[in-house]
Image (cartoon, grey):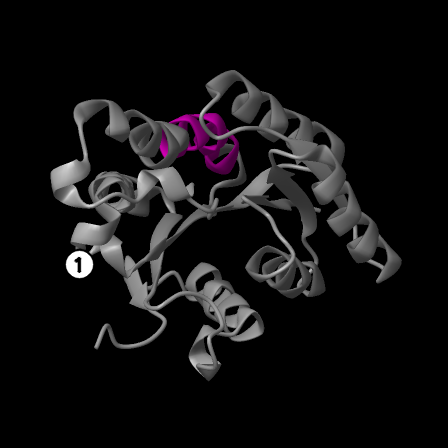
Amino acid sequence: MTTIAIIGAGSGLGLAVARRFAREGFSVALVARHQGRVDALAETLTSEGFQARGFSANVRDAESLRAALEQAAEQLGPVEVVQYSPLPAKEFMRPVLETVAEDLVGPVEFSIYGPVTVAHQVIPGMRALKGGTLLFVNGASAVRPRDAVTGTSIAFAGESAYAQLLHEALAPEGIHVGQLIIPRGIGGGEESHEPTVLADTLWRMHSEKGEFRVYAASLD
């Protein structure tokens, strides 16, 4: 059995994706900062007959992130799929004229250093499996920067560039890298934005290994 590692796992999209991939035979590693929260999610999945465990890590702490992914592979099976979708902090979102250099440290660590750490941790295992998928989930500011969320806009743009470069570099090896853009946030009354629908979209991105970027809905 191989594993999907959901980084930034929560009770919304994370849990929906966990269930979707678990139904396809994956074990599930739930990774987030608070051990109690991911343990509760894992307990829910276990009660439904799935194999799941929680692992604590801070995406701004490379050592903890590498350790969580290493433990997940050891305890659940090789990591075949990673979903990188932690929720950005509110302090990352300031108007552009109020944003100083120090304000960008957190967003860059969160959205660029974190993904780079994850990729270098899991790619060797995916190569051993002769395939795998890295999925990055972002809001619309990744492709359409907004003044009100300057830090996230800048950092998401860097994450997007890195992910696309990975897509191009790894495709010849059978490893897919994809980015899902979710305009206007998860839920909100739009059917295409509901967690279960988004989970189906992410499953298709993994199973079909198509284009790099997929939009949950039109930006407009």
Determine the secondary structure under disc 1: loop
- At a point 48% along the width and 21% down the height, the residue shown is 61
Splitting the image into 4 quarters, where does residue 104 fall?
top left
- At a point 22% along the width and 52% down the height, the residue shown is 148
Q: Is residue 145 magenta?
A: no
Furthest toward the left, the residue is 97
Q: Which residue is mark 1?
A: 144
Q: Is residue 153 left or right of residue 125?
A: left
Splitting the image into 4 quarters, where does residue 93 fall?
top left
Q: Is residue 169 left or right of residue 135?
A: left
Name the foreground residue: 124 vs 11. Answer: 11
Q: Which range is magenta?
A: 115-127
Q: Is residue 183 left or right of residue 118?
A: left
Q: Quadrant of the C terminus?
A: bottom left
Name the foreground residue: 191 vs 89. Answer: 89
Q: Is residue 36 left or right of residue 172?
A: right
Q: What's the amino acid at mark 1?
A: Arg
**Main SS category, magenta section:** helix
Q: Is residue 122 magenta?
A: yes
